[in-house]
Image (spheres, helix red, strand yellow):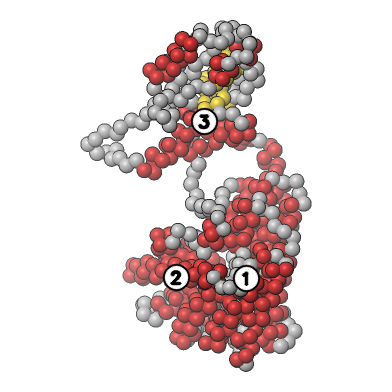
Amino acid sequence: MSPPRHLGDFTLNRRVLVTLAWSVPIGVLGAVAAWALLRLIALITNAVFVQRLSAEMVSPGAAPHPWWLVLCAPVVGGLVIGLMARYGSEKIRGHGMPEAIEAILMRRSRVEPRIAVLKPTSAAISIGSGGPFGAEGPIIMTGGAVGSILAQHLHLSADERKALMVSGAAAGMAATFDAPLASVLLAVELLLFEWRPRSFLPVTCAVAVATVLRAPLLGAGPLFPVDLGAVRTVPVVDLLCVGAGVVGGLLAVAVTALVYFSEDQFARLPVHWMWWPAIGGLIIGIGGLIEPRALGVGYDVIGELLTGRATVSLIVGILLVKSLMWGLSLGSGTSGGVLAPVFMIGAALGAVEGLVFPEVAPGFWAMVGLAAVVGGVMRSPLTGVVFSLELTHAWSALLPLLIASASAYGVSALLLRRSVLTEKIARRGYHLSREYDVDPLEVLLADEVMAATPAVVAPDTPLPPSPELLAATLARQEVDGGSRAAGGGPPLQRLYPVVDDDGRLRGAVTRQTLVAPGGACSVGDVLIEDPVVVHADDTLREIASRFARHGITAAPVVDRADPARLVGLVTVDHLLDGRLRDLAEEHDRERPLGLRSWRPGRRRDGYATLRP
């Protein structure tokens, strides 16, 4: 059997190369956007809490500040964000990733140009004024906006535009965290909704470019270097990692519920949503008075937790205060990301577990907790593992992190319908599935489901046909059995191939035309001379796309080497066979090696050859 022609289609290959070429400048722009955002955050943080003009990274809680500054700075920052959202763009509200997903799925990867300016600015104000958020969500939206804006100036399809938008988002992530593999996985697990060369290659290229540029822009090396040495865990520790993963999953469920509980409560307030971020800022200020080091991004705190240098009071304070102030304030619709807070909360949880679990290495259990909570909150277990490893370069901890992240993911999937990222989209009335599966229409070919002996007519068949002819068609179909319609009978053949005396395909005619020929004398007068045809080695997905493109429900199947030789007929009913096979594999239970024999499936060939 000859291979499907689309595998060697030059046009598709050329378009992939074009997208790949444009991903290079997008990677550069993503890295520059990450540098600009981090510097802007540092600039605002210094101005607010140190009263100096500097772009050096500083933590708001690293030094003591007047109580009124800690309390009021987040409120003022929230008020500014509310004004920007109301009079600039409401799309800057939120933590960035749901907005990016919504732009991909609902707006054909089109982002307004002003988002590329307003989103990083609002995030920098939020974080710089003490907000307990991360820069990754805003940089995803900003990098995605840069990629989308560039793509919108090019003659591209929506899928190609999506590839470039996600390339920008992933490039920004890679430059921010120096985590190229985790950024690609994040793109695949959260943004692309596919794993194909047309999108995977541009994303990888942009990430590689941004990671190379990170060294001169932001420095090289892991963000939180951890030296675990050649750690080797014993089975007891691996088993405890399961428990740590379960606890991390429960915490992930709790903080996710807290975020949307807060959002529901803010929605009930009798004030305009413009004021909500200021109210959320008041919550942040109160939390900052209790635990000042919970303010801001907190990279320094994450470093202390992962290296085992954090005190017990800091560990407990971060776990409780950071979780509450982050979850409650994020529901106000302010601007800020979720990853950095989740890193800190997860590391704090792991550090608490490290107080009672057997010691493995300094910071080991904090890393386990980080991977677990990221896997549970983001519902991206592989991203959680790889992020943890790339942030620390503690590669020897791969297996424990995988166990913990997968355990947390399982708990989160069992207890929550949706993650913190997709719940907001669902609340806007959209259905979103992040489960990857092989399309059953992609693995079945036409000759596996088609009617191999369809009823055909000759060009000289008189019209209208005799009632006996049509009745005989149904009778022969009933004898042969085959695919069943919703009512339980065989599907009604609505398209008849027209063949000559030598069996060569001349065209096709619809059943409606046969029944109501409109004065025509024979089939030859009304036949469709150039019908849409498919080939026996076409996948059902190709056939479904062809049906949708031409607005048809049936097509003759011809020999690829000899297009005039009819080999069958395929209809929409046959396309359902692929889905039915998938359902059978998922739900039908059997015991192939048991005493009972396997019950064969139903036949699919439901048409009989009928000549006048």
Q: Is residue 176 above or below residue 283?
A: above
Residue 611 image position (x, y, % from top left) = 50, 9
Dot 1: what SS?
A: helix
* Residue drawn at point x = 59 percent, y = 29 percent: 552
Q: Is residue 534 above or below residue 375?
A: above
Report crowding for label 1: few under 14, some 14 to 19, many 20 or more residues within 10 A (C-alpha).
some
Residue marked by disc 2: 254
Report crowding for label 2: few under 14, some 14 to 19, many 20 or more residues within 10 A (C-alpha).
some
* Residue drawn at point x = 62 percent, y = 90 percent: 68
Task: Give the mark toward the camera: 3 or 1.
Answer: 1
Q: Is residue 528 above or below residue 248?
A: above
Dot 2: what SS?
A: helix
Residue marked by disc 3: 572
Residues under numbered marks 3 and 1 in contact, where contact means CB atoms less than 8 Å apart: no
Residue 368 image position (x, y, % from top left) = 45, 71
- Of all residues, the one furthest to the right in this rendering is 153
Q: Which one is earlier in the sequence, the residue at label 3 or at label 2?
A: 2
Q: Residue 179 is drawn in which quadrant?
A: bottom right
Residue marked by disc 1: 273
Q: Amino acid at mark 3?
A: Val
| Distance from the alpha carbon under mark 1 to that under mark 2 | 25 Å
Q: Which one is earlier in the sequence, the residue at label 1 or at label 2?
A: 2
